[in-house]
Amino acid sequence: MKPYTYTSLILIALLFLSCGKSESNSTNEEESHDDSTVEITQEQFDKSKLELGRLEKANFSEQFQVTGMVDVPPENRSTVTSYFDGYVSETHLLVGDEVQKGDLLVKLKHPDYLKTQQMYVESLSNYEFLTSEFERKRNLFEDQVISQKVFQSTKNDFLQAQAKVRAMEEQLKLMNLNPDQVAKGNLTSELSIYSPLNGKISKLNVSQGKFLAQSEMIMEILDLDHVHLELNVFEKDILKVEKGDTLNFQVPEVSDETYQAYVKVIGAEVNENRSLRIHAHPTREDVNFAVGMYVDAYFDSSTESHLALPETAFSEMDNTMYVLQLESKTENNYNFKKIEVETGDPQYGMRPVLNSSELNTEAQFLTRGAFDILSSGGGGHDH
């Protein structure tokens, strides 16, 4: 074999050895890398508004959720109508205005109102005449001057006139008119409608000159001093609820704040949606809940105490939950250790750590920003 052939074989062998050594070194470096530690600079910590905290005791309950809305009792809701047709002649209110019981809400005008008052005056005059005639003929009958048949006829006319006058008086009262004033000749083509309770106007169906038929809604007034929750509890959870039970609820479209309430009334019948209506009263009266607000409510059926961290301390990766425990801190750096934890469902912003016995309960943890740090690969990993 020629010399250059030996030389070539030697060079190839050296090349393979070099590659093998390089791959071995690379593998050793990867094996020596610890991806369970995360390093964050003080600048990153401040800029990301990260926070530290410790494990703390929290109560977690087996819960079931119900939905519903804010409402008022029937006696605190009034639909204002009129017993008579009429045209709106005066109105000054808007939706949201507050009114007191007895306040003028609207005035209606119609020529028929004058006819009704005229009929009352005429009926009253006829009644007064027949009253006098009845008294006169009763005396004659007692003196046996007239027959019983004549007296009975007069008495019949008197009683009919009396009934008509009394019915007309009640009709005037429905028009909010004073029969005594009408009897004196003080007639009006308008009638006034007054507020039946204290509250706020929630609906309005009037405008100047609009014709309103009898029983047509003029406006709706709500007394918000006694708001309650109308909740729908599904059939499977009905036996878990008792009168007086406490519950927590939120108004998700308004805020994340949690409020408390207690069960006041439990319905008697399961509806077609296989749910039961219950009434609950909020414990706080200083919150201006609006009627119609959608609420999420939560009942507790059993309670356990666990060490816990805020929800923002956890990060899920590959179906495994992790937290970052502070290992050391220098002037410019934070060193964290990524720890796998067992946990349950969060409640009120906290999540339980079920394997807390495996953790250092005196250690500090990153309680805000863990997800962002781990999902981005950390601030400055120890490579």
Image (cartoon, rainbow, N blue to C red):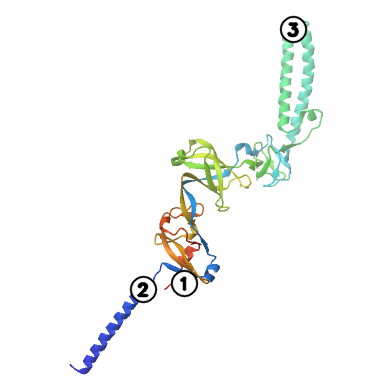
Q: Which mark is residue 380?
A: 1
Is 372 placed above or below 224 here? Answer: below
Mark 2 vs mark 3: give the one in front.
2
Q: CA distance from mark 1 to mark 3?
A: 121 Å
User: Can the viewer see residue 204 in this picture?
Assistant: no
Q: Earlier in the sequence, mark 2 or mark 3?
A: 2
Q: Earlier in the sequence, mark 2 or mark 1?
A: 2
To which residue does mark 2 refer?
30
Which percent across, then down, holds residue 4? 23, 93
Going by the picture, which residue comes out furthest to the left? 1
Q: Quadrant of the C terminus?
A: bottom left
Q: Which mark is residue 230?
A: none
Going by the picture, which residue comes out furthest to the top? 144
To which residue does mark 3 refer?
147
Q: How many marks?
A: 3
Which quadrant of the figure has residue 134?
top right
Which quadrant of the figure has residue 93?
top right
Q: CA distance from mark 2 to mark 1?
A: 17 Å
Disc 1 secondary structure class: loop
Left/right of residue 169 with respect to residue 48 in the rendered view:
right
Is 57 placed above or below 33 here? Answer: above
Is 84 placed above or below 37 here? Answer: above
Which percent across, then down, holds residue 13? 25, 85
| Badge 1 amino acid | Gly
Which quadrant of the figure has residue 104?
top right
How crowded pointer 2 is (Cα within 10 Å; few <14, some 14-19, many 20+) is rated as few
| Badge 2 amino acid | Glu
Disc 3 secondary structure class: loop
